[in-house]
Image (cartoon, helix red, strand yellow):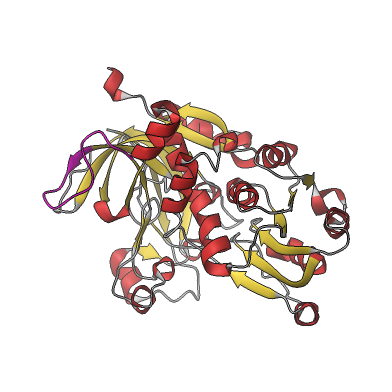
Amino acid sequence: MRALILDGEWKPRHGYRLTAEETEGRWAREARQVWREPKWELRDVAAPEPRGAQDVLIRVRAAGIAVSTLRMTSTDDEGYVLLPYRMALPVIPGHEFAGEVVEVGAAVTGFSIGDPVAVESLRPCGRCAACVAGHPNSCQVGGFAGFTQDGGLAEYAVVPAARLRSLVDLAASGGYADVHHLGVLSEPAAIAYVGMFQTDRHLRPGMRVAVFGAGPIGQAAVALARCAGAAVVCAFDPSPVRRDLAVALGADVVAPGAADGERSEEVIAEATRGRGADLIVDATGDASAVLPSIQASLAVGGHTLQLGVGGPAAQLSTMSTMVRGAVHSFSMGHLGGFEPVIELQARGRLDLRPMIRRTWALDDALDALADPETRQGGKSLIVMPDRRAE
């Protein structure tokens, strides 16, 4: 099968202490401390085969290129990758993907050959303290397809049945032509959903919402805030393309923010008649740049939700938070968000299709990764052909 492969040099930084598990498994909890000089390659490799009774072989139909995918090969001055979390190499990247079932293990139920499915890329162990406590998104020992296990930027993938989510109802309601695209978009939308409605749980109809960073997760946050009945939604991003996408997804007010020297707190004050925002979502991945504006824009009793990762350490003004009676929440991971996001799309309550800016063939994946619009615009998808038409 055709696949995109990422490899690199294993060279832990001086002073970084590897655990026994990292050394034995040749993976890093924090990729930017270990892996350097990464290289992409598009080549033919052996197709994966199901090994367990709960495994499912899927033919990948679409896969997204995420900011974290690009960070796997973006490097600092010493050649180390910028990715701030787990990675093992070599690996087939791609943690946002969807496809159709072509083979099921003997113990798999609920899925049939040909079913369209979306894939949850996190692989919680189910045994650690986080998993036992009901926090599988915080599992520190499980796998992560696309980072520590092979992902979806290939023609085929093997996925545990427990990590598949059916798109059958979505296909019936919206047409088969783009159901896999919507399955891909469910991953960043699930991250926003988990943060907004399971981790923070503050948003109510009629509240005022601001989103900093209108990349795919921020765009999904805008759409979900509108879906949840927000009275006003503001979105900030230096990219005019992303601001336009935010409007298409339901933002009432958009602005560049600090990129043009504009005070986003003044924009929020005007949009909320001076009351401030009840919920502010930071999806920038650079909290140090936006946190002062966010804290100055919160309503009394407001909440800040941190979804973006990366960037330098941010300073938090405790007094600003305390006098407002504000709450800061932090969320990472998508488990628990796929099913509601898929159901909302199937019912016509949520339309994420404006997020898609361009589709590429797998053979053009290297060009897609190098294209500036992949990093600065909307979501770029790698799309495989519909084999059923052949």
Q: Which SS does the magenta portion mostly show? A: loop
Q: Residue at x 21, y 39 (%)?
A: 112
Q: Residue at x 58, y 46 (%)?
A: 216
Quadrant location of the N terminus in the rendered image = top left
- The span picked out in magenta is 102-116
Q: Residue at x 40, y 42 (%)?
A: 97
- The quadrant in which residue 284 appears is bottom right
- The quadrant in which residue 2 appears is top left
Report the side of 62 relative to 316 (left or right). Answer: left
Return the x and y of residue 98 as percentages of the image width and height. 38, 40
Most foreground residue, 43 or 223: 223
Image position of 81 with respect to 360: above or below: below
Return the x and y of residue 338 as percentages of the image width and height. 43, 52
Report the side of 348 relative to 45 (left or right). Answer: right
Q: For the view shown, which residue lies furthest in the top direction?
A: 390
Most foreground residue, 149 or 336: 336
Most foreground residue, 103 or 210: 210
Image position of 126 with respect to 212: above or below: below
Return the x and y of residue 65 as percentages of the image width and height. 50, 41
Residue 224 colored in magenta in the image: no
Image position of 381 with respect to 385: above or below: below
Quadrant location of the C terminus in the rendered image = top left
